[in-house]
Amino acid sequence: MAATTINNLPDRYARAELAVFSQPEVPLAGEGHAHLHHAPRQRAIPAHDPYLFQIGHGPGHFQPLSVGPPLAHASHALRSSPTRPPLTSGLPVNHVSHHLLSDTVTLEILLPQWPGLRHVKLVRWHQRLQAPLGAEFIPLFEHCECLKSIDLSNFYFWTEDLPPVLRAYPEKSANLTCLNLLTTSFTEGFKAQEIREITAACPSLNKLLVACTFDPRYIGFVNDETLSAIATNCPKLTLLHLVDTSSLANERGDPDSDGFTAEDASVSREGLIQLFSGLPLLEELVLDVCKNVRDSGPVLEVLKSKCSSLKVLKLGQFHGVCLAIGWQLDGVSLCGGLESLSIKNCGDLSDMGLVAIGRGCRRLIKFELEGCKNVTVDGLRTMAALRRETLVEMKISCCKQLGAVASCKALDLVRDRIEKLHIDCVWDGLELTESSESKVRSFDLNELNDEDDELGLRKKRKFCLPEGGNWHLQIKENGVCCKTWKGLKCLSIWIEVGQLLTPLPIVGLDDCPVLEEIRIKMEGDSRGRQKPSDRAFGLSCLTRYPQLTKLRLEFGETIGYALTAPGGETDLTLWDRFFFNGIGNLRLNELDYWPAQDRDVNQRSLTLPASGLIAQCLTLRKLIIHGTAHEHFMMFFTRMPNVRDVQLREDYYPAPADDSTTEMREDSHRRFEDAMNRRRIAD
């Protein structure tokens, strides 16, 4: 194998290219480009991000994140030309973002070329290789004198690999400012002792993201002592994420749950107060505990005084965050500097609690509500109206009383302000009458004091006095509630497998003139369902959005039969025909597709119906498929006149250890690349 080389580009070029190759030169042909992210080993792929380089290694699969025009062959990347300067091994990059395709090339070969490297992200989706503890991280600390940031969020490793290496290189560990250890492959996460060792070795950290467990039934669970150690060892933290691994499992909660778990977390008020008191510079805090933290309101009030710079807060399984007794602000509603607030699985959050948050958090730009069963349209509508001048991003998920109809109703007073929205496609309430839609939250304006009335509600809004004499807050535009989502650019929705998308415009999302991107996530087990009686899932209904160019179809959590369907059972090919029918009517530029999975064989693969129907989308320019595929299925895409970028990725856990012989191998990839590169594209 040839030595690893790179391009020494002039300062005006903000990119670096790493090539690992073994084949002879082959000239670049055509103008179209194939960009296979499940490409053969020992191939060159260009970098995509200025001075950002991800290094991944391991056999057979990888996830290059490049979105720039690819090179057809590795050797072409290494040729000198009038527009490509001669090669050298001394490119002074600060960040490295790329993947190695050969399992024989290691970090020991690469890293000596960039002694000034500061930011590294490692990527590996398959299981950890057999090696001594920490052996994979040693080259980073041996060769990178200026290392500041390590991102292992997409790297499969063992938690016990990291602490010994940090202790072995104390000077370089002390210089680290960012550690991202939110690795989704963990089952239990970092243990309390490991977190203490990591923070003790890295006192200069200002960003720390850790996957851990708060469940007291497990050895090494996070408790008050762990929180105290984090605050003591890393007082400069501005960003702290402590996330339970069960939250990273990407599983949707039960909307019928009361929000409380059987066990409480071993985190007390005193422990949380000590954490907040020791981190005065904190700007972003995520505590997704997944076990009950009860009566947390008084603790959250401490954030206002101890963490005065806090702007982003996400709480998972915290109860009593805002009791809203009377009109006195309490709990999280006292954190007036928050710009982003996420409340997840709060068992006792009420409508009046939401109103208090709307009154107290006056700078709120983003608000997320997940798994809160007591919240209704009334409370959310009033809260959104109070924050009308600032709120632009909303997420409403897994709330028992907030399906698609209710969620859109709750936001009808601020539709013209929202730019990004997530709702659940639960179609309860489609039969709502016009009279029921006119109801709004009872809101006694006489209770407002001058400090609360920052929006001038008494003076600037129109109100109606219904029967009973209670004032109802009803913001109007020219006397009528706004019906148009004037600023909505990104819509994200969740839908259960087997449900139709066609009611989407009916619930109130019919008029979105600037909507550019839709993300659809589907979950559920299709194996027990009958053959779909309807012809199509409903993608054709999206044609009503004239600016729609990007579509993400994430069916990765949908379970079905790919290879193991028993006799008489429907497999995934039938469901793909159901999901994709009508996609050819959309004028998409980009499609990001996660196929459904067959868990019995760890199979996530492109099917024949999906390939054929996707190929009908003639305007498509970029196609990303997170899975495997057969060569003859991929050949459908060579007939698409405008497609320039095709990416085939295996960027999910667990990545398959071995592909079957019928799926794409090196020769298959090369034939597909050649077919793509022979095409000519008009622009």
Image (tube, grey):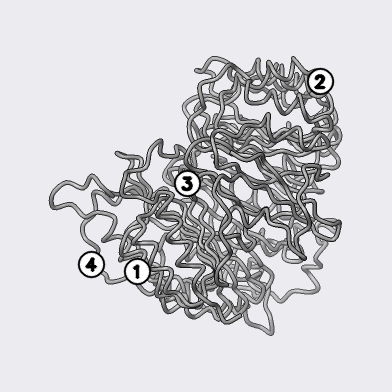
Residue drawn at (80%, 45%) of the image: 91
Q: Dot 4 surroundings within 10 Å: few (below 14), some, or many (20 or more)? A: few
Q: Is the N terminus in the top left, top right, bottom left or bottom right quadrant?
A: top right
Q: Which mark is residue 232?
A: 2
Q: Amino acid at mark 2?
A: Thr
The residue beneath circle 1 is 612
Residue drawn at (49%, 43%) of the image: 61
Tell whether label 4 touches label 1 (CB within 8 Å): no
Of callouts 3 and 2, which one flags the residue occurring earlier in the amino acid sequence?
2
Residue 205 seen anywhere in this rendered image of the structure: no
Residue 570 seen anywhere in this rendered image of the structure: yes
Q: Amino acid at mark 1?
A: Gly
The residue beneath circle 4 is 533
Of callouts 1 and 3, which one flags the residue occurring earlier in the amino acid sequence?
1
The residue beneath circle 3 is 650
Residue drawn at (55%, 72%) of the image: 30
Q: Amino acid at mark 3?
A: Glu
Point out residue 294 in the picture as x, y percentages from the top left corner: 61, 30
Out of 422 and 605, give the one closest to the viewer.
605
Secondary element at tag 4:
loop
Secondary element at tag 1:
helix
- The residue most toward the left is 567
Alpha-carbon span between mark 3 and mark 4: 32 Å
Q: Amino acid at mark 4?
A: Ser
